[in-house]
Amino acid sequence: MSTDHGRVINFGAGPSALPLSVLEEAQTGLVNFAGTGMGIAEISHRSKEFQAFLDGFERDIRTQLDVPPTHRILFTQGGGTGQFSAVVLNLLARYKLLRPQASAEDTVLDYVVTGSWSKKAAEEARRLGGSTVRTVVDARVYSKDGKAFDNIPPHAEFAFSADPALIYYCENETVDGVEFAHDAQSPAAFPFHLLPQNTLVPLIADYSSSFMCRPIPRLADHAVIYAGAQKNIGPAGLTVLIVREDCIVDVDAAAKLGAAPVPLILSYKTLADSGSLYNTPSVLAIYMAGLVVKRMKENGGLPYYEEVNRRKANKLYAAVHEGEQKGVFRRKVQQGSESWMNAVFEVLGEGAEKKFLDGAEKEGMKGLKGHRSVGGVRVSLYNAVTEQEVDKLIAYMARFLAESASVEAAA
Ligand SMILES: Cc1ncc(COP(=O)(O)O)c(C=O)c1O
């Protein structure tokens, strides 16, 4: 029978909570994987048992996200940061093959900057050189204080280039708590209608902190979607890629035409040609993420998680809103641009934030401190955080509000 093993509620932003049932199942696999008599961290990645597991993992992602046959699912390492470089190198190679005469000046990379992670990705593209990196829009310009990432900018401000080598956005900004809305009618939805009208738009999305929390809008219109596993689906060490076939290019042929040489391990073609087994993959991380997506399927797949995650986010933001009206909390993100996965807010008053965090910790709720660069409180609501756990936090927030009111009344 399952016990709680003395575990606390983990609202951390990543690495983050994993389902207890998966951790328990993984304990068995760590000792004896699939009846082989060897643990998952001990068995060859070329064994038929591991291959069968990998195939099932891929299938579970493909069916749940409804990935079309035009797109490959690839597994690699290096995290989101690895992909900041890999997407640039692979897409520059693709562009060189399409437009061999284009100079670095004419090779334009469009970055939509809505938070710390897309800003970092753009910086890496600039560092790699060989192209002209454009900021399509910088959300700080539209923020309340002119400095913070607190919004998805108005659609009228998105000016994409006519023929870019890539267009990049981060669907959910984990640090700042800003996310594109999934309702196509929302002003905070990604403006797919403004993209250049070529048939194969090189649209790249970083889904690291929102992967498999709900369906991906317009998935088939993306060239590359990537996600580090360590938020919603597994331990660190695994990166999942969904890559449209036309972005899997011969990087060596491109290099002969003058594109930057691409390290083999970053080349999408290397990964695709080897079935993601060119070198030793992160076997253990794949195993645990595989168990998570299998469990997701058994629970009803993405429609189930979308519903639960919607409820979790709605009730949490309602609690923050209530605290805002009482002058105790302050939302950091503008209405409509709030993330479902990472809710950020401030606790107002001298020492109040520390009091809030310490009190939560005493009640077994950890990982609530905001990212060091922005401060405040951050509540990460990934799939493995249950609705009951969110209810417990909300009850604590209500008590905190009541206490703040009585202290004020006594003063
Ligand atoms: C949205 C997003 N992109 C990229 C990264 C960087 O990922 P990694 O630490 O796996 O390199 C993170 C990490 O938290 C993230 O949240």
Image: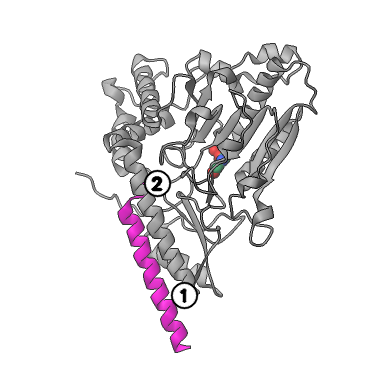
From the image, tell me which residue sits under label 2.
17
Q: Are marks 1 and 2 in contact (CB under 8 Å)?
A: no
Q: Nearer the viewer, mark 1 or mark 2?
A: 1
**SS label for mark 1:** loop
Q: Residue at point 67% right, 36% down?
A: 160
From the image, tell me which residue sits under label 1.
326
Q: Residue at point 41% right, 37% down?
A: 215
Span colored in magenta? 383-411
Q: Nearer the viewer, residue 134 or 59?
A: 134
227 over 143 or under it: above or below: above
Q: Position of residue 40 (x, y in %)?
A: 36, 26
Q: Position of residue 136 (x, y in %)?
A: 69, 41
Asked where in the image residue 267 lies, by quadrant, the reply is: top right
Check disc 1 and give the amino acid type: Lys
**SS label for mark 2:** loop
Q: Earlier in the sequence, mark 1 or mark 2?
A: 2
